[in-house]
Image: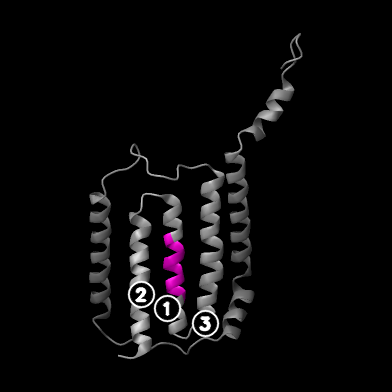
Amino acid sequence: MTGADVLLLALGAVAVGAGALVVATRHLVRAGLWLVVCLGALAGDYLVLTAELVAWVQVLIYVGAVVVLLLFAVMLTRAPIGPSDDLDRPGWAAALVGGGSGLGLAVLLIDAFRWSRVDLPAAGTAERIGEQVFRSWVLPFEVLSVLLLAALVGAIVLSRPDIGSRSADAAQPADEGGRP
């Protein structure tokens, strides 16, 4: 076992542990921060596997954009951040569904491949990935950016109840005292 194998296993253990804490914590902001740790450990795994471009995309897109968008959405909508007893439910049903799904997928994969060897295509380069992104995938990226912008504007509108009330107050006539 080489040093790269040990580092890969250690980062994998950090990613699995942080992923478990993402779904186990009762605080939403802490779950977002554990998600940062999990995605950072995955980026480290990609670096160990010498996929530097994928590692930087992981850091820039997922850690830098998705998690920040999640935290901003939580802060802008004034969602409950801490635990709430009226919304919490026992976790045994979710554990049962998750375990059953995982077991079903494992059986499906083992049955489909039967431990056979699959030939992989040649390794991609940054140039080939760039050609694919800017030729075939430009429109989906633009649509996604518009969707994220609309979600952010919607979160701002939902978090500020005074935005819609200004027009309603201006339409009502004032009484004798000058008050609406």
The furthest residue to the top: 176
Identify the mark nearer the N-term, 3 or 1.
1
Under circle 1, the secondary element is helix
> Where is residue 143 drawn, in percent x and y?
61, 60
Residue type, label 1:
Asp
Residue type, label 2:
Gly
Q: Which mark is residue 12?
A: 2
In this view of the protein, which residue sits in the foreground, 81 or 155?
Answer: 81
Q: Which mark is residue 52?
A: 3
Mark 2 vs 1: CB contact within 8 A: yes
Q: Distance of mark 3 from mark 1, alpha carbons?
A: 10 Å
In this view of the protein, which residue sits in the foreground, 157 or 19?
Answer: 19
Q: Which mark is residue 45?
A: 1
> Where is residue 1 drawn, in percent x and y?
30, 90
Residue 113, by quadrant, is: bottom left
Membership of 57 in magenta stretch: no
User: 10 Å neighbourhood of mark 1: few (<14), some, or many (≥20)?
Assistant: many
Identify the mark nearer the N-term, 2 or 1.
2
